[in-house]
Image: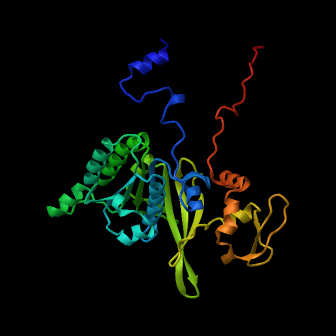
Amino acid sequence: MSLLEKLKKNSTIKDSSVLSKSKFFNEKDMVTTAVPMVNVALSGSLDGGLTPGLTMWAGPSKHFKTAFSLLMSKSYMEKYPDSILLFYDSEFGTPKKYFETFDIDMDRVLHTPLTDIEQLKFDIMQQLQELNRGDKLIIVLDSIGNLASKKEVDDALDGKSVADMSRAKQVKSLFRMVTPHLTMKDIPMIVVNHTYKEIGMFPKDIVGGGTGSYYSADNIFILGRQQEKTGTEVTGYNFIINVEKSRFVREKSKIPISVSFDGGIHKYSGLMDLAIEGNFVVKPSNGWYAKVDLETGEVGDKKRLADTDTAEFWEPLLKNEKFKQFIKRKYEITYGSIMGQTPVLEEIEEV
């Protein structure tokens, strides 16, 4: 028996295996969403998407955080018809209409109301402990930013006004415990969080809850937005997904997504600027756009911007390997050999 076989046999951890054969290091399950640039934010690829582990949407109020979470949940539940959504709710700001908008079957959603972090910690660990790898579950927590600690609640009941120094520790403890289960059991968890402004001359957005989320999360997205107006009337928002942390996408990448009040998320938003940057689309004249034939270089029929927001215009390009590779090169983290560029030390002869 080789040393490797002996170590494996003697291990008290049943999932120990040779790394090359480990089920935890195989290609991760990836759930593609209906919005191409959301897939890029999640994975760096148009064909990618949501993976098991912790994904966090952070931002101020009314920044579409819950909607992005439900978009991803819908994609997961659509891919796995027997899957369940476990929805932890501390804000109670997600009406039934939200689920209906995304066509989520509410008979497949377990709604769990929360009052404090410890309650969440005990319940989610009980749930995860009873799951097996292969059980199809997606978890949404809306939100961690609005969840008090038990000490904070008890102090209020006792009439105490002392500062609560335990909350950050409890949040860190929560994520520290759930993260291994999410990875080992192939479960995606989506967390909604708040942000606050850093003190300074040029304040930046900081994710709430301390360092626990930063250490545990696979993806952290901070959302910004601008109003979209027709004349003086606000008709929607242009959101910017700022990639704060990612295992797959270059950090500090900015990915635009447009949302209108009457049409919801624009499926093809964020693609036009990239297509122009890569010379897949050109502007023959101001306000007009045309696709370029990638084989001949010929410029196609001109269209107004509003007329390009169609499957006919975008779907052929989304299936084109050159366009896919262009997007990957721009956003995806690449891994080369760390030692590949190490100079070889030549032997120095003593004189």
Vertical placement of residue 127 versus 56, above or below = above
- Expressed as whole percent of the image width and height from the top left, the position of residue 260 reads 53, 76
Quarter of the picture holding the C terminus: top right
- Expressed as whole percent of the image width and height from the top left, the position of residue 60 reads 43, 68
- Expressed as whole percent of the image width and height from the top left, the position of residue 340 reads 69, 32
Say left or right for 311 vs 163: right
- The answer to whether residue 84 of the structure is visible from this angle is yes
Vertical placement of residue 179 versus 158, above or below = above
Q: Residue at 80% across / 70% down in the picture?
A: 300
Q: Residue at 23% across / 55% down in the picture?
A: 150
- Expressed as whole percent of the image width and height from the top left, the position of residue 142 reads 36, 61
Residue 70 vs residue 313, the one in the foreground = 313
Q: Residue furthest left?
A: 158
Residue 299 vs residue 349, the one in the foreground = 299
How many numbered circles does the render carry? Answer: 0
Q: Residue furthest bottom?
A: 232
